[in-house]
Amino acid sequence: QEWGSYMFGWKSVLSKNKTGFLMFFIISVVLAGVIRWRGAGTGLGIGDSLLVCWYGSEPVVEFTLRSVLEIPGIWFFLHCYLYAAILFYPQHKLYQSDIVTIRMKSRRAWWKDIVLWLAGSECVYYGLFLLAVVLVNLDQAGTGWRPHDAGLLPGFEEAFPGISSFGFEQGYGIFWVRVLLMPVLIGITLGLFQLTLSLYIGFEWSILVSFSYFLVSLYKEDWWLIGNGTMLVRSELAGYPHQTLRIFLMCGGIILLSVWLGYWKLSRMDILQRRRS
């Protein structure tokens, strides 16, 4: 029965998001193609493309109009899309669900279904982005999937101003954790944080609070600001010790707290009154 519930959840994710998945995949192919075009002649590979996407920016030292407006465009776009893509269906399930369905299922199972849908959708969205990057750069797979060390790609810094590669003397583990795992983990964390907040302060305010929390990461480096978790330039590769582990634990704590507080609130909510309002 438990396995059947998980399978039904995945089928729900895939069936209700077909258009969104297709649109994001097309956008991802275009984005990967533009990066490949800009890096033409440099020997850009799959790892290098991911480095360009998730390089990020240095923390702001002095706040000026220019420093505030200078944001890492690809990094910001990807996070915004992964955040917005999972906003509305979970809210629909909370406030517009069929009353018969609510009465037939326990609220624990109902909340679990919403959480699994959110997490599953985020995994599929980011998986499609990675697939697009691989397909666009498939002819470069023979040169290796890893990003090149600093100085090994002539013309790289000219093609992508403000972005530099790293030495990778300590290996590539941190790099792969940052570009493969962290975007999904942070997306799920922000999604659950927003969803749980909406039960307490409403949909609009929950968006404002959760997105503002993420936005601060653009300008400040600290372990409790989880947006730093996908910025390679603010990782151990650039001299920030233990940053990845701290943000990983922070995300885990927010997820667990959000799941518990969401269920606690949902178990005490007057569903019929909430739906009418």
Image (cartoon, helix red, strand yellow):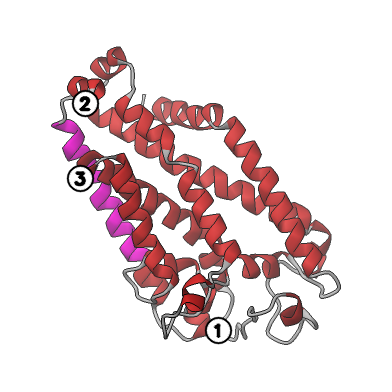
> Residue beneath label 3, please?
261
Left of 244 or right of it: where is 268? left
**Residue occupying image coordinates x 44% and y 53%:** 187
> Residue beneath label 1, please?
170
Q: Earlier in the sequence, mark 1 or mark 3?
A: 1
Q: Amino acid at mark 3?
A: Leu
Q: Secondary structure at mark 2?
A: helix
Judge whether residue 276 is colored magenta. Answer: no
Q: Which residues are magenta?
A: 248-268
Q: Amino acid at mark 1?
A: Gln
**Residue occupying image coordinates x 64% and y 65%:** 50
Left of 50 or right of it: where is 238? left
Distance from Cα at disc 2 to Cα at disc 1 = 53 Å
Assess disc 2: are there few (<14), some (14-19) or many (≥20) residues with their C-alpha within 10 Å of its C-alpha. few
Report x, y in % for residue 127: 59, 48
Q: Earlier in the sequence, mark 3 or mark 2?
A: 3
